Image: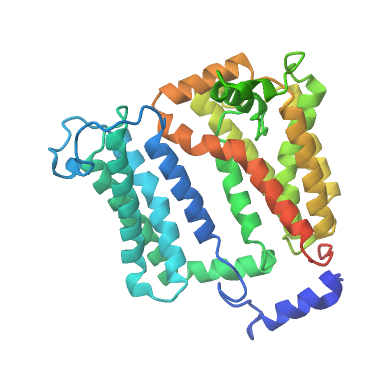
Amino acid sequence: MRRPLQGGAELHAAKRSEDVGGVPHSVGDGQKTTAWPLALVLVCLIIYASLYPFSEWRNQGISPLRFLTSPLPKYWTGFDVGTNLLGYAPLGFLLALSALRSRRVAWAVSVSVLGAAILSLTMESLQSYLPSRIPSNVDLALNTLGAWLGACCALALERSGLVGRWGRVRARWFSPDARSVLVLLLLWPLALLFPAAVPMGLGQVFERLETALADALADTPFLEWMPMREVELQPLVPIAELVCVALGALIPCLLGYCVMRTLWQRGVFAAATIALGLGASALSAALSYGPEHAWAWLDAPVRVGIGLAVVLAVLLLALPRRVAAALALLALAIHLSLLNQAPADPYFAQTLQIWEQGRFIHFYGLVQWLGWLWPYAALTCLVARLSGHEPQAAAEK
């Protein structure tokens, strides 16, 4: 027997949103698209990657638009072409997907490509003030082409009916207010690509923030206002690392439970989420140390932590949604507290130097902020949900 959520109110609303065949209506019936917030996140990441390292700004005595009429560069690599194409293809896809919701198909591709081209033109122009960056008309053309390819892909998916099918799947699996949670869940595996000192450990920013603040306040009287630590940060003991890994894998599961409809859906989601987390962590290790070391991070504490996360995810399947949100908030607080009481591992610092100085420099800029800020964005989302007036609900059986 199915136990209704919210005293039957949610099931009643779901029935009203279904057509004769029992299928919820397409995207747009009470659902807010995740494409717009994802596009905004991507724009911020593109700005960061395009203007990195944000230092030594100066007027070099040339017009910011001079690169438009400059000769084509003599040297280029397949890697450069690929990154410029792939960097803007998701943006064109998301912008077009958002525009297609207005049902104005004719201008969806044009507007999305134009917006991406203006962003690329602005970034290339600003690079003329950075001695370490070289604006390029080829980059502008490749960025625009990438956005066009992404927009065409979105249009093809819309015409094939896949976008509408996703809307119906989303209506079956998630509550109508799931947009912010879905955005966080989609960004989580990307955040894991940032090399972490502790597997699944996102948000370890205290030591880096402390150093940056001390450098910024150097030679000022405000430096004395900073609290001074009497002892240096100590490495995590194995049991603390185990807890961090377990909580890091469990938190996205609990986040999903906040918007999931049934027990079996939660079970499938938890299994897929933990598997995706393992895959993203392995990919990060492969990019950092080589494919032969993709699973070298799976030592005993990590394996036990993953196993504990699986057990807890199963035991907590039937939690009411607000209780799941509260527990996720508590888990995040403990997770961040433990992580930020430990220093960065010296081998981890060396890995970051490889990413910062190698060909991963642009990709590094895209994922490092996700790795740092994802837990704090999740905290904000959970606090907002708990401070609202959502009725408590458990998952359907």
Residue 19 falls in which quadrant of the image?
bottom right
Residue 34 falls in which quadrant of the image?
bottom right
Residue 391 appears in view = yes
Residue sitting at x 32%, y 50%: 146
In the rendered image, which quarter contains the N terminus?
bottom right
Is 56 drawn above or below residue 47 in the view shown? above
Q: Of all residues shown, which one is farthest toward the front? A: 221
Is 318 drawn above or below residue 389 in the view shown? above
Residue 278 falls in which quadrant of the image?
top right
Image spot of residue 323 (x, y percent): 84, 55
Relative depth, front residue between 180 and 258? 180
In the rendered image, which quarter contains the C terminus?
bottom right
Residue sitting at x 69%, y 24%: 225
Residue sitting at x 21%, y 43%: 137
Q: Is residue 19 left or right of residue 239?
A: left
Residue 296 appears in view = no
Residue sitting at x 37%, y 39%: 50
